[in-house]
Amino acid sequence: MRIYLFGIGILLSFTLTAQNTPEKSRAQLGLIIGNILEAKTGKPLAYASVQLKDLSDTTRKSSTVADKNGAFEFSKLSLGYYRISVVMVGFAQMNIDSIYLRPERYDFNLGDIKLNDAASALNEVIVYAEKPLIENKDDKITYNVGESALSGGASTAELLKNMPLVNNDPTGKILLKGKEPRILIDDKPTELNAQQLQDLLESLPGSSIEKIEIMTNPPPQYATETGGVINIVTKKGKIGWVGRTTLSVGTRGEGNLAANASYRTQPFSINITAGLGGSILTGDSYSKRENIYRDSINYFNTTGSFENKNLRPNLRVQTDFELNKQNQLNFTYQGNLSYYDNESINTFVNINRNKEVYRNSTRTNGSEGEGYGHNASLSYTHKAKNPAEFIRMILNVNANKNNNDRAFFQEFLNPDFSATGIDSTQSQFFDNFNRSASIRADYNKPLKKKGANFSTGVFYNRSFFHNTLNTSFLRKSDGVFIPNDLLSNDFEFRQNIFTARAGFGLPFGKGWRLNAGVQAEHTEMGFAFIKGNSADVNNGYWNLLPNISLRKEFNKSFNSTIVYRATIRRPGIGELNPNVDYSDPYNLRFGNPYLRPTLSDNIDWNMSWIKGKYYINTSLGYNRLKDVFNSIRNLVGDGKTEVSWLNIADRREYEASVWGGYTFSKQLRVNTSMGYTMNKYSETEKKLYRYRDGSSFYSSLNYTFTPSNVLTFEGSVRFSNFANPQGRSRSNVNMNLGVQHRFFDRRLILSFNAIDPFTPQRFTNYTYGANFNLESFNSSNTRNFRVAISYQLNKVVQKSQLSDKQKQDAIKKARGV
């Protein structure tokens, strides 16, 4: 509580500081900066002439010239509306209107201003529009992380949870509208399994992210993805070099140090981000199970607590090289290490029908290990004379390894919890190695009809996974660990995926547009068991997946789209892996190598209304799923349950969602989203297996308040409730509140975050089987008060070394005088 009150005090002091700034000094704090580039080549236009005009008094003008990197600056400006004109011999003049300097925002970075050749373009006039924290445009929701007060010290995984329509399930998996999305980084897919992707997102610093884009109606190359697409765009840097470092600490027991350096010229740029993050996460749990037999009922209760420690170094290097204006190369390397040390303590209690304890035990589980992940991608883009025609090729390779040494000690107790003198010790050692390689080629060509296009592409992915699990138990008589072959295995898993697609977009009159395409895909997978009690598995299947959408633009404010997509959800190694998780001997967990993919037909009707200060988007959907696979719990002998993955049944889903935002003023914006899904099973499955129709609900509220140019408040609130075939899982309300203050010409940024300040994250689960009922609860100590300091190592604009006479000569030369 003291820390929380201290944090509130910091927020209030920031606010008072901003409010008490003398009006006289604020009136002369105006700042406008930017970079002048050549549109065709991206080269900086050194010594371009830049003129600033006060629109309230057109006689008040000032001029400057861009430096060698094309950068310019106007400082100590009065408040009001301004117009900027950029002039350079041989280039069309660029005018930017309606730059509004005011008390709550008196500095603007206009970014890259690109000038076209005078011979090929007329003089241009652009009305400047400020970038909000969350944008809704062109069927895409964009979260401008660079403007966010929550990004300081946060990981990319944390930032995703603040997006509209995004939440996480009880296992921490990221969901978009209740389904797993495809994650892209800089428009390139991450060909990783669920655990590898989670490690990557946890290790990637939020300070390295420029923006996050959500596409609920995916582009053609990802139209068969069941959960839409999330594209994470990293920061690229400006002309010259830019450096930034960020340090954050949190009361939960976490710390993060990240540094970013970028250098950009024409035609080369490089961006390097390195970081080190560590955290300690604690929590507790309980479960209450009722076992129902033909002639009796008994009960099984558990309580537990855990402490997880991890350390995550990471490095990301990205380079871009422009061979010429039509050919570009990009190389990206992402590496992350993981060291972890986890421990949990659990108590197991067996209770008879008379509510009397007849068996007790305690179990301590330890897990210690390390892993690494290396990802490298090379992309090549060739643009024709018409930039809308291009071919892009992406080569991606991954190598990941994880070692996990697990130890289990169980002590058996009498009903009164006194020691019996009987105990057991087991050990499991996992050694996992994964590698994959993929190649993707996409081609897009505009057709003769204006706005029409044809696109096609192919994709091939080859992955290999080798798992070794050695289980042993301690023989008390001589202290020797004896191998247990029944709980050990050694297998290889291979999967090859090939897809080929083609599609077109065709506009009609009066705002109508038709997009259609089809994708043929072949999947081949197989398990080869070197050791274990499972037979080898081989499977292969072809699928033809069409998609079509019809869009109507009624006017600039309102549009509607009807979409049909056939999609496929393949089981991953997490669902297929037959390893037995022995951490809880009364609740065994393992995968199923015989799973089949889930195919679905999805129909959505989307509407978008954007007008003035608000926007509203709605979506209604119907999904028909075949061979749904889900984790299912069954009660077996001796009061134990087994949890595995099964193809359970076909399913129908009915969906509705809405997301929108309202701008109360230039200082205050609010966004909200909510969604509802109803799952329906056949009467046969409901009678035989007690599967349940159920509904899932998720909601979020985001706000941003910018009382001054250097002070930003931001917050998000989330709630979710998930249905599954055997019951449901419900979370409590999760909250993230942040404030950010900028000092020293915005080079120093101080951020404070209060994460779940009132209650930590909790999930309550209810499971109903054919012969048991289960209530389980788990809580993680997510309550965290975080302070982050970020410092930009160099100024965005370097002071010009030219004399006044040299500046005037450069201005005359730029204007052709």
Image: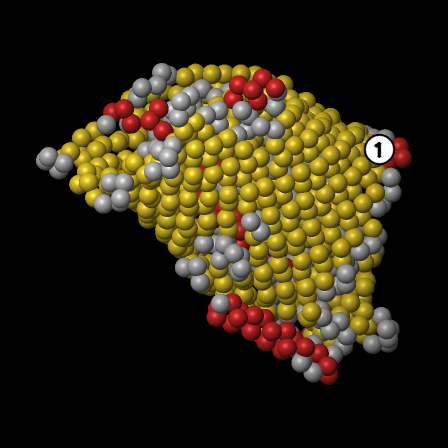
Counting labels gives 1
496 sits left or right of 326 in the view: left
Residue under the image location 24 percent in, 36 percent down: 426
Mark 1 residue element: strand
650 sits left or right of 779 in the view: right
Residue under the image location 23 percent in, 45 percent down: 418
Name the image quarter holding residue 448.
top right
* Residue 442 locus on image (x, y percent): 62, 31
Task: Reply above or below: 326 against 122.
Answer: above
375 sits left or right of 565 in the view: left
Residue under the image location 10 percent in, 35 percent down: 478
Quadrant placement of the C terminus = bottom right
Residue under the image location 41 percent in, 59 percent down: 253
Q: Does any portion of residue 88 appear in the rendered image?
A: no
Residue in the foreground of this view, choosing between 593 and 306: 306
Name the residue that disc number 1 marks: 512
* Residue 572 locus on image (x, y percent): 47, 29
Task: Reply above or below: 468 against 133.
Answer: above
* Residue 655 locus on image (x, y percent): 69, 34
Furthest-left residue in view? Answer: 478
Name the image quarter holding residue 55.
bottom right
Amino acid type at circle 1 is Trp
423 sits left or right of 697 in the view: left
Q: Does any portion of residue 294 appear in the rendered image?
A: yes
Residue in the foreground of this view, choosing between 782 and 157: 782
Mark 1 is surrounded, within 10 Å at the Cα level, by few (under 14), some (14 to 19) or many (20 or more) other residues, namely some
Residue in the foreground of this view, choosing between 395 and 267: 395
Residue in the foreground of this view, choosing between 192 and 758: 758
Task: Reply above or below: 329 against 457.
Answer: below
